[in-house]
Amino acid sequence: MTRIQRVTVRDIRFPTSDDLHGSDAIHVDPDYSCAYVTLETDVPGLEGHGITFTLGRGTELCVAALNTLKRFVEGRELEDITADFGAFWHELCNESQLRWLGPERGLIHMSVAALINALWDLLAKQAGKPVWKLLADMSPEEIVRAIDFHHITDALTPTEALSMLRQHESTKLLREQELLEIGLPSYTSSAGWMGYSDEYRRKLCQKYLADGFQWFKMKVGADLDDDLHRAAIIREEIGDDCKLMMDANQVWDVDEAIRQMDVLKQFRPVWIEEPTSPDDVLGHARIAKAVAPIAVATGECLSNRIMFKQFLQAGAMQFCQIDSCRVGGVNELLAIMLMAAKFGVPVCPHAGGVGLCNYVQHLSAFNYIAISPSLENVVVEFSDHLHEHFVDRLRVERSRYRLPTLPGYSITMHDASLQDHEFPTGRVWQSRVRGA
């Protein structure tokens, strides 16, 4: 038995706005940051780590929420929590007073994700396996027990989920070996940020082409003329055979999105990502119908499995972009990936930021091994920032994620990185771009 004795939470921030990394039409000065959770146990040397990703200011709010939520795990046995993981998840997300601050959305739910992800990291380290392998070795019954099916049974029942998982059970090992040999296909967003010079953008396109990338994503939505200019540069550099995707980061109204894409379609984008408010199911459905055959991709800012259910039911997403920290961690993501498979929608996770690439490689690997055994139109986002701060450093070779082999969720940060980038409690964070 492993007892969780203490939970600590740290505010970790990186001044990425200095170099305009991560800039888009709405998030003009992101400083990639995270609330970093450590679960200390009674087993010497055994700790669990988890994060939720933020953009600088406000990280202290996630830290405060986690310091409120940690009472759910402090003093408890890990085995007691994971014996009925779905029930624990429901308990955590439905505390009768805290749930009023959501429910199951926003800052509270993102903070839940950090705690849940830390539990999976701890469970995998205890088992001596990376999280993707831990999940792949679980039985269909164990996976289903980890999921809270409240409010989604009109789209996916436990019986259906069990059937889907059992269908692919006998061939899991073959796909596991395949991924260990060839890795997961990825796309790069690193050449597509706003604010770069034309020369630098061209160099980045050339770099990633040389690295084997064939899928490229760019940001749009701040200024149409600038979008056209940057799209022309990227298309010129990557040629006609490579795939181009566009991401508006929620900036447009519905009719505006349709008008903008009518102009931008000349560059043959595979998808337009987050064309309008992430909560607008019907708006996304209307955009999808109007801009076809360009697809709509969304999900990184959807707050819970119920929102994903509605987008899938309405035909409002053709690419499902799960985010490892936006919803309530691994347990809820299992439900979302199963629903996406039922509706025949490929899962192409959102990554980048601090540690998101580390997380989603595990999720994508399990999705292919046990849920949706096809890599057609499946690409995992890769953003080439901050990977040096993690003990289990991300490996992307020839545009392929190479599966991690170290135990855990690949999110443990180096002690020196934590010390150098911890933000002092009580200070006010100001963006470098805005002259602070």
Image: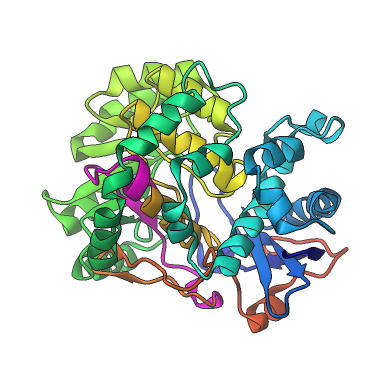
Q: Is residue 220 above or below residue 265?
A: below
Give the left or right position of residue 11, taking residue 113 as reference. Answer: right
Q: Nearer the viewer, residue 326 or 61?
A: 326
Q: Hey, which quadrant is residue 165 in on the image?
A: top left
Give the left or right position of residue 410, taking residue 374 as reference. Answer: right
Q: Is residue 331 above or below residue 430?
A: above
Q: Which residues are magenta?
A: 367-390
Q: Position of residue 231 (x, y in %)?
A: 27, 47
Number of numbered discs on residues:
0
Q: Is residue 399 above or below residue 421?
A: above
- From where the camera sits, is residue 12 visible? yes
Q: Nearer the viewer, residue 125 or 328?
A: 125
Tell me what residue is drawn at x 69 percent, y 80 percent.
45
Q: Position of residue 82 (x, y in %)?
A: 65, 50
Give the left or right position of residue 275, taking residue 427 as reference. Answer: left
Q: How is the image coloured?
A: rainbow
Tell me what residue is drawn at x 18 percent, y 59 percent.
237
Q: Quadrant of the C terminus?
A: bottom right
Q: Position of residue 30 (x, y in %)?
A: 59, 56
Give the left or right position of residue 26, taking residue 417 as reference. Answer: left
The answer to if 105 sits in the magenta stretch is: no
Q: Position of residue 20 (x, y in %)?
A: 51, 62
- From where the camera sits, is residue 298 visible? no
The answer to if 372 sits in the magenta stretch is: yes
Tell me what residue is drawn at x 30 percent, y 58 percent.
176
